[in-house]
Image: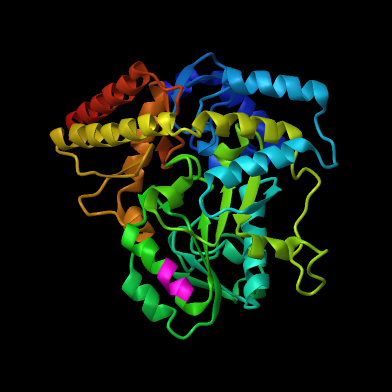
Amino acid sequence: MLDRYVSKTSKSKQMHKKAKRVLPSGVSYFLRYFDPYPFYAATAKGSKIVDVDGNDYIDFWLGHYALILGHSPPEIVNAVRQQIENGTHYGTCHELEIILAEQVVKMIPSAEMIRFTNSGTEAAMYATRLARTYTNREKIVKLEGGWHGGYDALHIAVSPPLDVPQSNGIMTGAQEDTIVIPFNDLEEVRKKLKKDNIAAIIVEPVLGAGGGIPADKEFLKGLRELCSEKGALLIFDEIITGFRLAPGGAQQYYGILPDITVLGKIMGGGFPIGVIASRREIMEHMDPLLYERPEFSFHGGTFCGNPVSLTAGLTTLKLLEDGHLLNQLNRQGDKIRQQLYDIFEKGNIDVYITGVSSIFQTHFTREEVRDVRSAFQADRTKLTDYHMYLIANGVFFLPTKIGVLSRAHTKEDLNKILLETENYVKKSQANL
């Protein structure tokens, strides 16, 4: 399998050798590295990425799950081309800020006002600060396996071993007011938070890095009730689920409203963006005309509200607004999760398929996967082998990460992943 990959990617191998001289690990983000070296993309269109060696890959990674319309969709390319002619970055107020903010407020049930950021990490950071400001409390609660970017206070207990820091350089004080609670275990959460006076709970309605695991509706409902009881805020990190599960995100899909919503990825239409959204009384704490220090919660950034990102984002949301495309992708997601499970079951290979909507992940285990602990108890080596087999045969998953569907995926694309999965199962059986 690796020999096949290496034989097809000689130019990528040379590029990675050069890259290691100027980029740690030879990449811009270590998440993108995989053994023996990552391939280097040259072009991307629709559902396909083409690497520097000319190999085509059907892409289920899709730019960290941001490209729900596929690569370089014509509507986005045309709109962005026109905006670039008008200006790439103003650094002043402009009408697109208002129009896109109105569109987000229209689509996201809990949103009355928003602020733009440049990334999901920034959005999560500013949302945390806003929650602390509004409640005048310090403790923030996050879920095991939840990924909220690189912000120090939330960069904890993402992957097992959960008690080992995710990074060096984070001061103890940055996380001393962060409480970690288990995912999908409401009884344990209530026990753990019984005596704590908390500012907020931040949760991914579907764990992304944690294994593509949906929260139980009753679990999210319980978190909502717990926050209301304690006078704390519930923050939904919808950077992956926003505009994917439904036009109004996971909060529409589950029928549970958070106090603050963090958005990104799909929201940018393929360009950098993040969003903090909430009701007016909370968001107005970002207004220094209404709140002086120390009641004021700062937010800002040079590229906040960049017109190119906003143009791409507005074009995307208009295409998703009526829910037709998302309903279609949700049906396809239900179908492909079942089809993949059936292929492995027929081959007598134990798997548990997680996901919801157009999100899916394979776990090589006979046990139910309900949280990050059970996800990482599955055979991760076998998962890497499976994904590397797919890559070597023209289907791209970033090894061990979830896959997603896009408008660009064709029936032939979906048949290809099923065929190569069948081939993988046959190969596995032959090696027993």
| Above or below 130: residue 52 | above
Helix, strand or loop for the magenta stretch, by majority: helix
| Above or below 202: residue 269 | above
Is residue 223 visible from the viewing direction of this image? Answer: yes
| Quarter of the image where one finds residue 428 | top left
Find residue 119 and report its horizontal and vertical position in percent. Answer: 65, 46
Choose between 197 and 429: the one closer to the eye: 197
Q: Residue furthest top?
A: 54
* Residue 83 shown in magenta: no
Q: Residue at x 34, y 75 (%)?
A: 188
| Quarter of the image where one finds residue 266 | top right
Give the position of the N terminus as an image quadrant: top left
Q: How is the image coloured?
A: rainbow
298 with respect to 61 (left or right): right
338 with respect to 232 (left or right): left
Find residue 185 and report its horizontal and vertical position in percent. Answer: 33, 68
Q: What is the magenta range? A: 224-228
Q: Residue furthest bottom?
A: 195
Give the position of the C terminus as an image quadrant: top left
Q: Residue at x 34, y 53 (%)?
A: 375
- The tally of labels here is 0
Q: Residue at x 47, y 46 (%)?
A: 249
Choose between 195 and 21: the one closer to the eye: 195
Find residue 312 and report its horizontal and vertical position in percent. Answer: 65, 30
Find residue 264 and report its horizontal and vertical position in percent. Answer: 59, 44
Is residue 30 visible from the viewing direction of this image? Answer: no
90 with respect to 318 (left or right): right
